[in-house]
Image: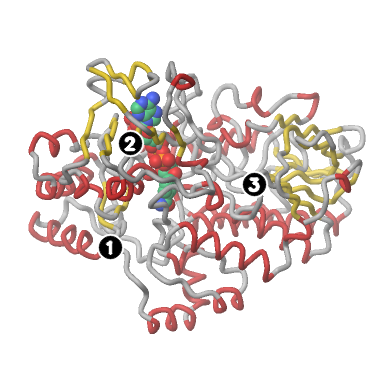
Amino acid sequence: MTTKQSNQAVNYDAVVVGAGFSGLYMLHRLREAGFSTRVFEAGEGVGGTWYWNRYPGARCDSESIYYNYTFSEDLYKEWTWSSRYPEQPEILQYLNFVADKFKLRTDIQFKTRITASHYDEENNKWRIQLDDGTNVSAKYFITGVGCLSAANLPNFDGLESFKGEWYHTGHWPHEEVDFKGKRVGIIGTGSSGVQAIPVLAAEAGHLTVFQRTPQYSAPARNHPYDPEYIRQSKENFNEIKKQMRESQGGQPLVPPTKSALEVAPEERNQVYENAWANGGLGIFSAYYDITINEAANETAAEFIRSKIREIVKNPETAEKLLPSYYYGTKRPIIDTNYYESFNRGNVSLVDVKKAPIVEITPKGLKTTEGEYELDAIVFATGFDGMTGPLLKIDIRGRDGVSLKEKWAGGAHTRSYLGIANAGFPNFFMITGPESPSVLSNMPVSIEQHVEWIGDCIEYLSKSGIETIEAKVEAEEEWSKHCREVAESTLFTKTDSWYTGANIPGKPRGFQIYLGGVGAYRQKCDDVAAKGYEGFALMSSSRTALL
Ligand code: NAP
């Protein structure tokens, strides 16, 4: 680790924000191509999402042999995952292994947050402000801030008066938190809450789950890997990599060709039963029309509801747990004993849609129906997704216009390919809004962006081009296309963090590209092959070449 003082007035070819999956590979890619590159990371170590999200039960819900980098065959073969859905510590260990293998730490400055980055038009440089009061500059400014790193802590009255301890799943302490025998309340039943609830239930004296929207979840059925399975995956590295990169969701799966409505109910039920027994997201991907057709969606939704009724012994509790929104239009969840937790004597469920939370009190939490005394509160209340992490930094492009101002009407209205923005030359976003990102297997989408950005910077450098900037028309066309694809699905019919609906006052708009990883990669490659179509390439900051 290098010192903070060494940054005073230093200039780099590229500055990258964040040392998670994105930032680590971006650093490696640019350094290999000979560009001076510096990563700034707020945490004390590498890992990004997997550094911060260390709540009890945190684990990945993409299968581990696919949830890793594939840019290096050596790396793929050197690392061996223990199980299908490994827990957070193992994923963090993997990212540390990557950082060590490629000797990345020397170019990462930890415990440093970038507070602002302003484009200096005259000198064609990004002026970057750090929270230690120093600043650096760079020709290229690249964000690898993750899609889900700005925690959403609802603005409940009285939190400061609470006498117990409280935690947010996305900012979990590094020390072990002891819930033994305590009265614990958890707010939120998204992916984080559903993973944490069974683990907290096993430890707490009593766990009260404050649920606003019931969730569809399917069993993960995690298991240790058979060494033979691992051997085969390593042997088939190239094929797996190709399939993932050309797929819809970044997994090497054969896409479904049948409609849920064209098969007999008995056959369909058997397909769902098999998926339930195998664990994972098999129900979500069983038929091609689950997320586009209401009746098809209802078949999967009702199947999961029937499982909830079967698992949860108390009919009143089961009823409260039954979801009604379109299955899959909030992030589909996989779990380990989630619904089963509600059969425990020490777990109770409170419906805060019916009786909303009014305040946090010194003793606990008050809803419109009563007060719950608690020793600890866990906020599993999610994130200001996609735009939130970017807008935490004061990013300003040409004429001092901020990204916040540009996106005041909603992210969906303005980005080119989810990578670039008109008015912001030489600024790239890894898995930005309007790219497949969180609706795909993240490492696959991250690698695609990193490689595209790396290739682009190499091209600019070799061609003597000083700036690249998205054109307004290209941006509008891409945003329109993203909206049209989203509106052809059921995703836009549900309030979720995908649409920004979870953050009071956030402009609504579907923030993710749903056209699929393979098609999206093709589009990005075509743009590059056509000399960066849709971008203005300039020999200086204002002189257009193309
Ligand atoms: P989330 O899906 O946004 O869930 C937040 C939960 O908090 C929801 O149940 C929400 O209810 C509730 N909530 C928010 N504000 C509330 C309020 N004021 N009062 C009562 N309830 C409130 O967040 P998350 O669970 O952290 O997951 C976010 C995303 O992170 C996931 O969708 C996924 O992409 C990713 N993630 C992935 C994994 C994994 O790979 N295994 C694990 C964790 C997270 P409503 O639904 O009613 O808004």
Residue at the image position 59 percent from the left and 22 percent from the top: 408
Residue at the image position 79 percent from the left and 29 percent from the top: 398
Looking at the picture, tell me which residue is in the foreground, 282 or 155.
Answer: 155
Q: Are marks 3 and 2 in contact (CB under 8 Å)?
A: no
> Mark 1 = which residue?
221
* Secondary structure type for disc 3: loop
Where's residue 119, x and y in %? Answer: 81, 34
Going from N to C along the chain, the mark reached first, 3 or 2, is 3
Residue at the image position 28 percent from the left and 19 percent from the top: 367
- The residues tagged by marks 1 and 2 sit, at their Cα atoms, a distance apart of 26 Å
Q: Is residue 474 visible?
A: yes
Q: Quadrant of the C terminus?
A: top right
Where's residue 522, x and y in %? Answer: 56, 57
> Mark 2 = which residue?
184
Q: Is residue 394 above or below residue 11?
A: above
Where's residue 194, x and y in %? Answer: 32, 45
* Secondary structure type for disc 1: loop
Where's residue 23, x and y in %? Answer: 66, 53
- Tag in front: 1 or 3: 3
Q: Is residue 486 visible?
A: no
